[in-house]
Structure formats: structure tokens, C-alpha cells
Amino acid sequence: MRRFDADDNDEFQEELEQMFDYEFDEDFATKNEILNVLQLDLVELDINQKILVSVIKMLERTFLWRFKSHHKKIKMISETYEAMYLLLERNSSKKKSEDMAEEIELLNMEELEDEDEDGEL
């Protein structure tokens, strides 16, 4: 039976260190930045889980799903998950690039307006 006394049990302490071994860069200035990184990781895990659930539900609706072996089902899930993840990633990167282009245009317009105001004085 396992004892949960961390002082007496070195193996337990090593397991804890391995479980919670999360390396942070020394560039983090505050604990808030570390918490933000952890929150982003949790959001990413949540998104990945939702993608996996939707892939499994989608594949379960196919006619031949019942007749496939477990190995084949896992392979199908893996391939479909990767494809879905890439599609969503490509879509989000496209939105990010469009948003950045809009921001650059706004900044350029603001600079032009500032130059016009300075020229009028």
C-alpha cells in the first residue's frame, strides 16, 4: 500500500516533481504572466478536447464505424483529428493575419491624419 507522506517517501516526491515539472523561462516578470500562460494552456487543452469529441461523434455516425476494428477506429480518429486541427489552425491564422492587416491600415491612417494635422499648423 502506498503511503502519502512526502517526507519519508522519495519515490513519491520524485513522482510529484515529474507530474508538476513545468519549465518557465526566466523572462517572466510576475506571477500574473505565469498564470496567463497556464490559463492559455488550459484553454488550448479544452479546445483540443472539444475537437476530439466532435471528431469521435462525427465518425460514430458513419455507416461502417460498427464494422471496423478498434485499431482501425483509433487510426481513423487520429487522422481525422489531425485534419480537423489543421483546418481550424489554418482558419485562425488566416483571421489573425487579416486582423493584423486591418490594424496596420488603421495605424497608417492615423499616422497620415497626424501628419495632416501637423502640416495644417
Image (cartoon, helix red, strand yellow):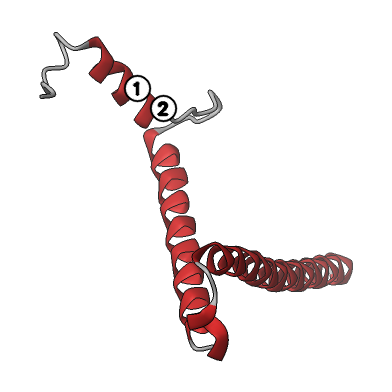
Q: Using the rendered image of the protein, determine whether residue 20 is visible from the camera's viewpoint.
A: no
Q: Is residue 40 left or right of residue 7?
A: right
Question: Where is residue 81, by image quadrant?
Answer: bottom right
Asked whether 85 or 23 is in front, the reply is 85
The residue identified by callout 2 is 21
Residue 54 as seen in the image, left or right of residue 4: right
Task: Provide residue 113's location: percent of width, then percent of height.
Answer: 81, 72
Q: Nearer the viewer, residue 103 or 28?
A: 28
Label 1: few (<14), some or many (≥20) within 10 Å? few
Furthest toward the right, the residue is: 119
Task: Work out which quarter of the rendered image holds the N terminus and state it.
Answer: top left
Per the image, the residue denoted by label 1 is: 17
Q: Is residue 91 above or below residue 66?
A: above
65 and 89: which is toward the camera: 65
Residue 24 drawn above or below residue 102: above
Q: In the shown orientation, is residue 88 left or right of residue 26? A: right
Q: Quadrant of residue 104?
A: bottom right
Q: Position of residue 29 (x, y in %)?
A: 48, 30
The residue shown at (24%, 10%) is 10
Cβ atoms under marks 1 and 2 closer than 8 Å: yes
Q: Locate residue 72, reporting x and y percent.
A: 58, 67
User: Mark 2: which amino acid?
Assistant: Asp
The residue shown at (34%, 22%) is 17
SS under mark 1:
helix
